[in-house]
Image (tube, rainbow, N blue to C red):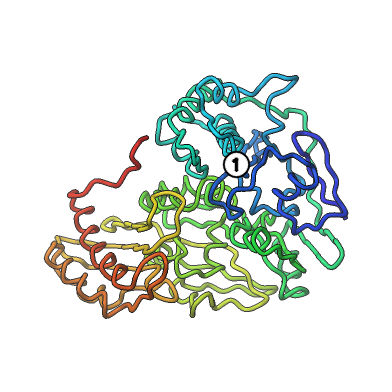
């Protein structure tokens, strides 16, 4: 079966190209559309940014910027892919391109197509009055080696003043190809949970692919070809968000961007963390379910899920079970999942009246960086006494792990700076972190101890939240 998609509004059908080919390679080597650049090939620099155009359940157009270096060709089946060559019409430049020229927003030009695509997506999707913070967030996934950011920010204000336009109003919707076959590669795109679970039985070694921000690296860096891929992005049961007075339930294939509004409303600190996971390009593809499934000890969301006492609904054909987040991670990148099981959804309890939740991410750069340490704290205080305390750290052990000794020190004690200093001294009883290129063991221990003090000052209104410095 062929992969069918639109490229800048024109129908394309490919049956002789590996579905494991990255979209970046397809554009540059097959289509000779070389406006899209390869910089890092790992989703950091944004030179390869393109936009996926689709329509939501209300038939409103969506324009999501993504990294084509991490996107597999099979993932754009049924989509409309927009590249920098597709902007504007009849020889007239798009508003973003015009603004970049007028404001002098390009120097060497290598990064320019990626910036243009990020700003095009911003122009098409922004629902708020623009400010520097919104623009910085939109551009956090694009790196300019020529330091030309101020003119680019000025171009963003000018271009976005035009507002969104529906550039493909009459585009034919394409059905997703449920099975693709190329030589010895198989790709499945089930649309129901039952189909997905049957595929897990028939192909227990098949790779589940939600956003591919992790798996895509194997294709872009190692040129891997995957024998069996099972896409989860079209499975209805995995793409739902349901909220009640007591809980927030997020499907395992819901992207970070799709979950951001609900998470921010329920847990503002968690929402701020989400905006620091990769870039907008990454968040438009990556999922919390994928972050859980890869089981990285530095997965940003995992300490949050454990401290919030989240649970996962894990299903296989004919069975379902609940697993607490803190019991799910067994060893380095090892979980309690059986080969035929998948994570269906994540259930997060809402905060109670006296509970406060905070999460802190420590990394060398504010944006677009992997964590050295992540700390998530759930505190319950009554009459200045700590009656509940859950502290979970990432980057301190082979798995995301609660600081149980630290918790014992604080429980039942007065909420005070002195007691928080005592808690920090117990960190070495809980963790023996490793040293790597991100941080030394000693650094991690000191940072973890200091984060308890930061928590106290934060909740006592003695510390302002960190902000990105405007440039």
Across and down, in percent, residue 87 comes to 68, 29
In the image, 214 versus 356, the foreground residue is: 214
Choose top left, top right, bottom left or bottom right for residue 53.
top right
Along the horizontal axis of the image, is 192 left or right of 143? right
Q: Quadrant of residue 439?
A: bottom left
User: Does 421 sit left or right of 326 as displayed?
Assistant: left
Name the quadrant of the C terminus: top left
x and y percentages locating residue 36 in the rendered image: 67, 41
Q: Which of 55 and 168 lies nearest the eye of the viewer?
A: 168
* Residue 393 point in image, percent of width and height: 36, 68
Q: Is residue 42 above or below residue 470?
A: below
Read off the residue under disc 1: 65
174 vs 462, left or right, is right
Report helix, strand or loop for mark 1. strand
Judge by depth and name the residue closer to the eye, 168 or 22: 22
Does 131 sit above or below residue 377? Answer: above
Which residue is located at x 50 percent, y 40 percent? 144
**Which residue is painted at 85% across and 61% down in the image?**
181
Quarter of the image that includes the N terminus: bottom right
26 relative to 238, above or below: above
């Amino acid at each position: 079966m062929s992969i069918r998609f639109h490229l800048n509004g024109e129908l394309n059908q490919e049956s002789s190209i590996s579905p494991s080919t990255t979209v970046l390679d397809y554009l540059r080597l097959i289509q000779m559309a070389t406006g899209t650049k390869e910089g890092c090939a790992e989703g950091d620099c944004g030179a390869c940014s393109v936009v996926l155009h689709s329509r939501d359940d209300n038939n409103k157009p969506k324009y999501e910027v993504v990294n084509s270096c991490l996107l597999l060709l099979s993932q754009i089946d049924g989509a409309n892919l927009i590249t920098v060559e597709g902007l504007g019409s009849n020889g007239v430049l798009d508003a973003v391109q015009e603004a970049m020229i007028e404001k002098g927003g390009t120097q060497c030009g290598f990064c320019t197509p990626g910036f243009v695509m990020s700003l095009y997506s911003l122009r098409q999707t922004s629902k708020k009055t623009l400010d520097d913070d919104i623009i910085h967030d939109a551009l956090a996934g694009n790196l300019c080696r020529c330091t030309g950011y101020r003119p680019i920010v000025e171009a963003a204000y000018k271009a976005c003043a035009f507002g969104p336009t529906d550039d493909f109003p009459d585009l034919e919707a394409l059905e997703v190809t449920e099975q693709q076959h190329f030589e010895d590669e198989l790709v499945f795109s089930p649309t129901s949970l039952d189909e997905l679970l049957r595929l897990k039985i028939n192909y227990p070694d098949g790779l589940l692919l939600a956003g591919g921000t992790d798996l895509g690296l194997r294709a872009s860096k190692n040129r891997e070809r995957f024998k069996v891929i099972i896409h989860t992005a079209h499975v209805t049961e995995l793409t739902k968000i349901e909220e009640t007075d007591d809980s927030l339930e997020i499907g395992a294939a819901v992207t970070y961007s799709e979950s951001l509004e609900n998470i921010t409303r329920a847990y503002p600190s968690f929402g701020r963390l989400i905006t620091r996971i990769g870039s907008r390009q990454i968040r438009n593809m990556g999922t919390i379910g994928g972050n859980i499934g890869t089981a990285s000890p530095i997965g940003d969301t995992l300490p949050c899920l454990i401290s919030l006492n989240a649970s996962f609904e894990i299903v296989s054909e004919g069975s379902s079970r609940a697993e607490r987040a803190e019991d799910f991670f067994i060893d380095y990148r090892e979980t309690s999942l059986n080969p035929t099981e998948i994570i269906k959804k994540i259930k997060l309890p809402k905060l109670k009246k006296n509970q406060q939740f905070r999460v802190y991410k420590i990394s060398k750069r504010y944006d677009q960086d992997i964590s050295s340490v992540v700390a998530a704290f759930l505190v319950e205080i009554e009459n200045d006494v700590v009656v509940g305390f859950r502290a979970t750290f990432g980057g301190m052990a082979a798995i995301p792990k609660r600081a149980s000794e630290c918790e014992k020190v604080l429980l039942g004690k007065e909420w005070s700076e002195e007691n928080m200093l005592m808690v920090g001294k117990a960190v070495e009883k809980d963790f023996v972190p490793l040293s790597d290129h991100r941080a030394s063991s000693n650094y991690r221990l000191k940072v973890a101890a200091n984060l308890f003090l930061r928590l106290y000052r934060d909740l006592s209104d003695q510390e302002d939240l960190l902000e990105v410095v405007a440039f």
